[in-house]
Amino acid sequence: MKHLPTDPYKGVRDFYPEDMAVQQHIFNTWSRTAESFGFERYDASVLESSELYKSKGAANEEMVNEQTYTFTDRGDREVTLRPEMTPSVARMIAGKSKELAFPVRWYSIPNLFRYERTQRGRVREHWQLNCDIFGSTEVVTDVEIIALAYQTIINFGARPEMFEIRVNDRREMKDFYASLGVIDEESVAKVTRLNDRFHKIDRSDYLSELRLIVPGAADAILDHLEESSQSGNEVTRALNAIGINNVKVDRSLARGFDYYTGTIFEFFDTDPENNRSMLGGGRYDNLTELFGGESISGVGFGMGDVTMRDFLETHDLLPSKKAGALVIVIPTEAEFNIDGEKAAMRLRAVGASTLVDISTKKLGKKVAAADHSGAGYILVVGEDEVARGEYVLKNLADGTEMSGTLEDLAQRLAV
Amino acid sequence: MKHLPTDPYKGVRDFYPEDMAVQQHIFNTWSRTAESFGFERYDASVLESSELYKSKGAANEEMVNEQTYTFTDRGDREVTLRPEMTPSVARMIAGKSKELAFPVRWYSIPNLFRYERTQRGRVREHWQLNCDIFGSTEVVTDVEIIALAYQTIINFGARPEMFEIRVNDRREMKDFYASLGVIDEESVAKVTRLNDRFHKIDRSDYLSELRLIVPGAADAILDHLEESSQSGNEVTRALNAIGINNVKVDRSLARGFDYYTGTIFEFFDTDPENNRSMLGGGRYDNLTELFGGESISGVGFGMGDVTMRDFLETHDLLPSKKAGALVIVIPTEAEFNIDGEKAAMRLRAVGASTLVDISTKKLGKKVAAADHSGAGYILVVGEDEVARGEYVLKNLADGTEMSGTLEDLAQRLAV
């Protein structure tokens, strides 16, 4: 018989307990921070009707056709594994726009799929924290959403100097280009795409390329970009006012998605070893228009698990291995396994996580394994203990022991 | 322009915050209980190579072809959205069988897909708590896995009389049939399938159908089934010993999956309004054989979110609506929104979840909304407060107020 491979499907990850503990640490920190800002959690299925992604025009049609998992179901419906969360949440907001009390603050931690050539750091499935405030165009919501992204990173134990927040404004840039006579959409799009490479290429190369696109406006645009880091804008000043100082205006900041219409921002790791974008987001107008009904604006961001883990590893912020159960119950021999389970049930009832070592190892090896697991206590269950109804709870950290009935010991653990 | 529908894809669910809170309550209770038994969490992708589900023979091939979401990816690989978790976890266990210290206790909360005709209570995507102990054939592991399923239900606030645990043993039944001369696999399978309907049909109908399959053994089998609830077996007696008494042997218990080889069990809701199976599981031998390597046994169960929610609703065990933020900061006017955000950042730093009401509502309406949200406190931020640096924190439950700087009030909340 031919054996099946034990690898996961190409480009996706298995999470063995050690990796899952890291993943859970990331998810828990994300959700704890979002909830500390009063955000409510939502979710949708990973399966969406493909038409949800096709309606934004030809460029999107290409994305759906070439970079998504799209297939036809048995009922002849075209289905896509969501490549991003924004269309799903826009659909949900539009579906209850009459009932929701705006502004609403929502977050989610969806898995997203992209069919990409697999390479280092590129996976076909990743998880993302998505946070949005819908139904307000006030600048304070731009500020709050950036503050939430900031606080999320801080809550992993990061210091502000480990990352930098860059802010730009699509509308401001558009107005500035217009003031130079650059108003046709194609030129604006070309300049924006070139700006995206501003920090990666030489100043002179940037300028020559820019002159090819907008000959009369190139020098003024370069000046505007270069002076941006000395300036602030309404958003960066408000961020400073609430205590966030690792922020600057960067007028070269572009962001790929075409639906942003106002403030855009990205967080960059300042470590030279991992100098890249950690997350990004921005403001968009009327994302719900595809569904009809009233116009609803929003501002939000997405932060990926792979990028987050890279940042935490780079800055040595990953927690040490998670301890398992608090108490290890050790039956001296197999015949006391059920007595061990009985003792464990009693200890769990007071909230003490308890594992029964039912392996066939010798007593000494069981004690060593308990110590190695990071458990706080062991409780041996053997002939004598069962006969007398008296047990010894040993503290593995300091070697102290407490004796008593299971009831007594449970009460001690409950304190 | 034609508007897009706001419904989710057919057969899957949107989780708006209210439903998501219930879902999170279920997931949290599941994971808390599993971890209280020392189980470690793992996960895998919802995407698996289709061959993983095809290798168990023709019956499975049919299941893969007709009841799963299976498609061909852009690299010409056949991919399936996992319909159950056991093949994935078997693959992972087989992949690290040399490194794992058996027995291992693992749990997961995967979403699973089945392409089914949608009907009441039938969804195409559901979530399931999966718990398994791998690498031990000791009866104590059967007992522990049932105890974990039991404790999970109890931890939702259920009382033992709300459900009943039925236990059977595939091997014992096989030996019993053999003692009556019934040894061919087809007859055993037919009897097992008929037994599955034992509680749903008349005694006389059962007996006539049984006589058609095994003429000479029918009466003995019926006797055996009927006396089962008066008997105990090793598993039920051990469960009694550790304090679980809502358990009985039910020799008609069949369980659909063909891979069980020893103990099988199901939990039934005892409420006549919802009298159905809540969860099931059992022991299987060498589930990893498809992957080669050493033989590894396991015992486990799966518990679905839809079934769980039905049980909780039937017995009125769903928690009341989850409160939002602890503190609502209320700027008197829009110009104090940023000051409100600043105050909120300070309160969050001591762990108090804090929402800033940046809506355009009047002050009185904001206070009423805060009260309605279930918040514990409000903090008004206006001209006077900002100028003096003195704020009032009002306790919404008892109407008492505390005054002080943000620092003072944060310290009070931290206590």
Image: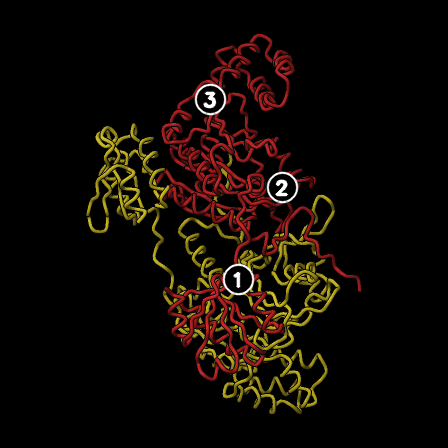
Chain colours: A yellow, B red
Letter of the chain that mark 1 sits on in the rendering = A
Q: Amino acid at mark 2?
A: Arg
Pointers 3 and 2 within a single chain: yes
Along the viewing direction, whichever of A66 and B41 lies nearer the viewer: B41
Letter of the chain that mark 3 sits on in the rendering = B
Q: How many marks?
A: 3
Residue at 68%, 53% (x, y): give it. B8
Pointers 1 and 3 within a single chain: no
Q: Mark 3 to mark 2: distance in Å? A: 30 Å
* Dot 3: element: helix
Mark 3, Cα crowd under 10 Å, few <14 / some 14-19 / many 20+, is some
Residue at 45%, 43% (x, y): give it. B107
Along the viewing direction, whichever of B123 and B91 lies nearer the viewer: B123
Along the viewing direction, whichever of B311 and A8 lies nearer the viewer: B311
Tell me the tag on residue B171: 3
- The residue at which mark 1 appears reads as A129
Residue at 20%, 51% (x, y): give it. A398
| Residue A201 visible (yes or no) | no
Q: Amino acid at mark 1?
A: Leu
Pointers 2 and 1 within a single chain: no
> Where A15 falls versus A146 (above or below)?
above
Tell me the tag on residue B395: none
Tell me the tag on residue B114: 2
* Dot 2: element: loop
Q: Amino acid at mark 3?
A: Arg
Quarter assignment of residue A197: bottom right
Letter of the chain that mark 2 sits on in the rendering = B
Along the viewing direction, whichever of B392 and A252 lies nearer the viewer: B392
* Dot 1: element: strand
